[in-house]
Amino acid sequence: MTADDTVPALLKETPTWLIGQAAMHSHRILTERFSAADARGYHYRLLAALKEFGPASQAALGRRTGIDRSDVVAALNELAGKGLIERSPDPADRRRNIITITPAGVDHLDCLTDVLGEIQDALLTPLSAAERDQLTRLLTRVVDHHTTRR
Amino acid sequence: MTADDTVPALLKETPTWLIGQAAMHSHRILTERFSAADARGYHYRLLAALKEFGPASQAALGRRTGIDRSDVVAALNELAGKGLIERSPDPADRRRNIITITPAGVDHLDCLTDVLGEIQDALLTPLSAAERDQLTRLLTRVVDHHTTRR
DNA sequence: ATTCCAACATTGGCTTCGCCAACGATAGCG
DNA sequence: CGCTATCGTTGGCGAAGCCAATGTTGGAAT
């Protein structure tokens, strides 16, 4: 008699299923650890984009992070509420806001970067460093193929 | 001047981000192709479990497929509406329904299995057969670690 | 046998996430 | 001057996963 919680073979070997499962665990771990640091994935994405590319408009941030303009608004409101970013009107283009990361924001980003490192570790525990590299390379090629050619 | 839609480096190299992106593309492709065959992922999971393990109660199906009991109800309603499964009360335990896959259901499952093969192909286009195996093995180990130890 | 707890199917609702539509304001171009 | 596009913002939609409550039934303990 098959155990009640056995996963069908047609699923457990298909890459799409595996990727979905991996993403599920990944997302779960990330949400847990980030919420322990009072943050969400959106916050990290936005802060990282700000630190890497400098001040930018909200629309540009959305494009870079893959976050919808409307969701950027909400996330930036939260970040501004904690003093991690600042919103100021662009004198050169009065439609735009210029978003700047504050020193506190940089600190918080660094903290979250550490947390994110722990998350990778927690997710990839069973893999050696070389295997993690291998996985990263394979996934990069898959993702690249579907993002550039689109 | 950095292009407006450049992805921050802190993201594009982290496995969690890559897995998330891959899952996104995977999910998009799967939804597209399956909806062209008038099906959803839930349907495939349930039919596959039924074919592999034979008739089962709804709760057992939910456990095997990882679908919540309440969502199993809705999905089975849809499948029953198309004559792909049959619901009959269990004489031995009147709390249970016994779900049986019909011949039409088996046909449809076989069809969807083909579609799923095409989906794997579409997703993993840039990878050789050996690389797909490698990816599958790596992901399997990651997923196993987080499902067994939980 | 009665009592109490667990499992079942079902309904309904909640949250997150990604997305889209609309709006008023502004910019740039013909 | 229009016309079109972009910007920030609000509001809402749909899918997915999850949880709670309900009425029913089984099974085990007392």
Image: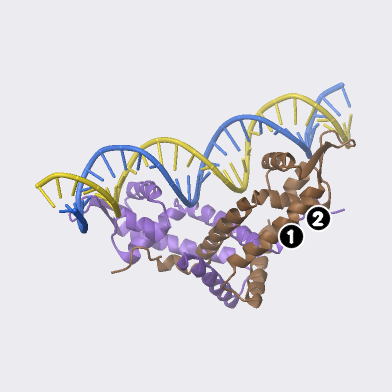
Chain colours: A brown, B purple, C yellow, D blue
According to the picture, the residue beneath numbered tag 1 turns out to be B10
- Residue type at mark 2 is Glu
Q: Residues under labels 2 and 1: Cα distance?
A: 8 Å
Which type of secondary structure does the marked residue at label 1 adopt? Answer: helix
Q: Residue at x 40, y 48 (%)?
A: B71
- Disc 2 is attached to a residue of which chain? A
Residue B110: image quadrant is bottom left
Which label is found at residue A128?
none
Residue B133: image quadrant is bottom right
x, y (%) of residue B77?
35, 46
x, y (%) of residue A46?
73, 49
According to the picture, the residue beneath numbered tag 2 turns out to be A52
> Are there few (<14), some (14-19), or many (20+) residues within 10 Å of tag 1?
some
A94 vs A16, nearest the viewer: A94
Q: Residue at x 58, y 78 (%)?
A: B130
Does residue B2 appear in the picture of this structure?
A: yes
- Residue type at mark 1 is Leu
